[in-house]
Image (cartoon, helix red, strand yellow):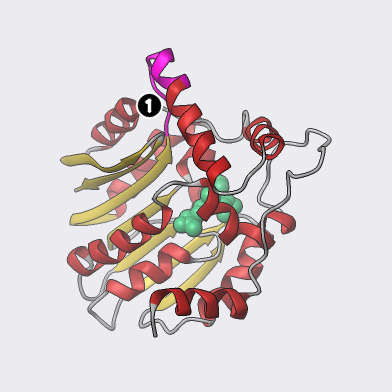
Amino acid sequence: MSKPALQLMRNILMNDKIDNLYASQQSGQPFSFNHSVAEVFPDMIKRSVPGYDKILRNITRLSSHFVKPDTNCYDLGCSLGAASLAMSEGIQHQDVTIVAVDNSDAMLAKCKPHIDAFKHKCNIELIHDNIQNISITNASMVVLNFTLQFLPTNDRTSLLGEIYQGMNDDGVLLISEKICFEDETINQLINKLHHQFKSDNGYSQLEISQKRDALEDVLIPQTLEQHIYNLKDAGFKHIDCWFQQYNFVSIIAIK
Ligand SMILES: C[S@@+](CC[C@H](N)C(=O)[O-])C[C@H]1O[C@@H](n2cnc3c(N)ncnc32)[C@H](O)[C@@H]1O
């Protein structure tokens, strides 16, 4: 079956809804991963995050390269399990467990049927918890796909340290994040380009500005340099940014 046909079938199967959560005037509540967001999440993330599908495709490629037999993989902040499914698709071994963690009830309630709707080779274990409480062990791959940005900045280094300690040598950590820039002129320009991207994907100016306000103090971006510094500090030997579009990046770090 062709890719668009598969996508259509997936949308029908999952009853994916269009994201119009910010289309009417809001009361200014901070953004949270609640039931309304979970309902529209696949549409929201695809129309808001440049390169999201590309990153998932490369998670598959990386898992095929890095995941070793009889090891664990972690999808931290799994939402509906897209990165777990992407990892599973690339994994070449039967005896691998993917541990998918999220602290949102609404997301996890939709995650299981979402994962079950797809054929996948690996055992995917869902855990409802804060990713900071998870013990990482025997890991050949860890994914933080747009999750670290929701943790308080002071907690990020210790989480990266825990991940590093629980990873096997030559294991890979993939971190995708929205970032900011030191240079304020560049920061403003790239934010504008991202807003244009959202507008091109059908979001109105009201939707864009209300969502931006709701995410203020909830999603705290750091610079690429800060992320690389944090990863070095955690002990990772080989670190680089393999993807960037506007203010969205994906970084790999190898132990
Ligand atoms: C932008 S979404 C991640 C998207 C997902 N990784 C993907 O590839 O589709 C962020 C997710 O992280 C979860 N999250 C945020 N902070 C968390 C924490 N401290 N512990 C567990 N989950 C967290 C949210 O509930 C949300 O589902």
Q: Amino acid at mark 1?
A: Thr
Q: Nearer the viewer, residue 199 or 162?
A: 199
Seen in the picture, residue 196 relative to 92 is either above or below; the reply is: above
Q: Which residue is mark 1?
A: 223
Residue 203 placement, left or right of 3: right
| Residue lying furthest top | 184
Residue 32 placement, left or right of 253: right
Rendered location of residue 250, percent (x, y): 33, 44
Q: Which residues are magenta?
A: 179-188
Seen in the picture, residue 173 relative to 92 is either above or below; the reply is: above
Q: Is residue 140 magenta?
A: no
Mark 1 lies on a secondary structure that is: loop
Please give the name of the residue rendered at 40% of the width and 59% of the height, measured from the top-left corner: 53
Please give the name of the residue rendered at 67% of the width and 30% of the height, measured from the top-left corner: 213
Using a 10 Å C-alpha cutoff, classify the residue at mark 1 as few (fewer than 14 neighbours), some (14 to 19) or many (20 or more).
some
Rendered location of residue 94, percent (x, y): 28, 83
Residue 143 placement, left or right of 214: left
- Where's the N terminus, which quadrant? bottom left
